[in-house]
Amino acid sequence: MRCIERYKSGLPGKYRVEIPIGNYDETIKCIIIKGEMDGPWILVDAGVHSAEYNGIKAVMELSQSLDHHMVHGGIILIPLINENGFQHRAGSNVFADGKNLNRVFPGKEFGSLADVMAYTISTQIFPYVDYVVDIHSGDAYEQLTPFAFVLGGCNQQVNDGSTMLSQWIDVKYLAKSMLTSGGLYNSAGALGIPSILIERGGMNDWNDAWVNQDKADVINILQGLHILDGEALTYDHILFEQVEYVRAPKSGLWLTNVSAGQTIVKDQLLGTITDPYGDPLSKIIAKNDGVILYQTHSLNAIEKGALIAYGIHHE
């Protein structure tokens, strides 16, 4: 019997569980809360990217405060999926293989640590949950305005379920993702699980305000799904059906002219990449009207690396 299945069919309670990652000397540390009453099961995770700290602390604190006596159904909490990266300050990557975990889902049974980590989640956790909430931040070099990704590339029932989850998240913007693999929540969606990704914070930082907002969103979702008692708040959002992802055409010094959350217009100069003398190498121009969702906010631009992303306003 699979690890999660054993607890799901067992007695109500709160359990600390470590799921082995293949033959590696690594585990995924979970807190499984089986409620006293029937209801849906949900996965709430953080730390896919190990330098995105707000979600890690938020899920850890939720694992301490939630009680199985309050729960209808069950909650699987994973505060820190990529512990290997966290221990080595490896940013978005798994330290052991240098891979971005959120690019390899659904993973491989045999492969490097990131591949097998993704496979373990895909095969030993996803089959036992009805919903997924994946919590992220901007990367160590990224400035970000709070928003959430919703599914758009799965079947209509799953897409609608993702949109339903979004109504309980206190952010101004939503961005639609058409991907069905690579990311944890995208891969869950491809398996028929309504999922969502929350983005809040960044720049290798965390604070109590961001952590508390992540926690409030999760509690609100749990109430909306009737996993916890209470009346959920609903929020209106601006939905971006399309996001422009700009990669740096050259390496150099990135001199941005904009901030996350700023409204931009077509043909606006967003920033310039220069050489060390200050001579321009490339100018980044907006192709559409939109809103900056996140951007590189460190001085260095890396050729072909992520530079800026903005939601596109369509007339």
Image (cartoon, helix red, strand yellow):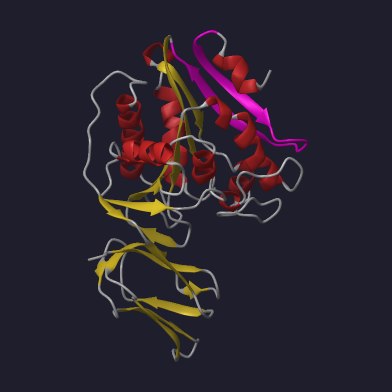
Give the mark count: 0
Instruction: Kindly identify the residue that appears in the image at 50 percent across and 87 percent down.
Output: 275
Which residue is more in the foreground, 305 or 131?
131
Is residue 281 visible from the viewing direction of this image? yes
Left or right of 53, for residue 89: right
Residue 122, quarter of picture: top right
Image position, residue 165 (x, y; %): 34, 36
Instruction: Kindly identify the residue that appears in the image at 43 percent across and 55 percent down.
Output: 138
The quarter in which the N terminus is drawn is top right
Instruction: Kindly identify the residue that appears in the image at 57 percent across and 10 percent down.
Output: 10
Image position, residue 219 (x, y; %): 33, 29
Image position, residue 24 (x, y; %): 75, 38
Which residue is more in the foreground, 12 or 67?
12
The quarter in which the C terminus is drawn is bottom left
Note whether 76 is above or below 108 in the view shown: above
Note whether 26 is above or below 33 in the view shown: below
Residue 289, quarter of picture: bottom left
Instruction: Kindly identify the residue that appears in the image at 26 percent across and 21 percent down.
Output: 230
Q: Is residue 17 magenta?
A: yes
Image position, residue 238 (x, y; %): 25, 52
Left or right of 299, for residue 108: right
Residue extending farthest to the front is 156
Note whether 304 is above or below 112 in the view shown: below
Left or right of 131, for residue 311: left
The span picked out in magenta is: 11-35
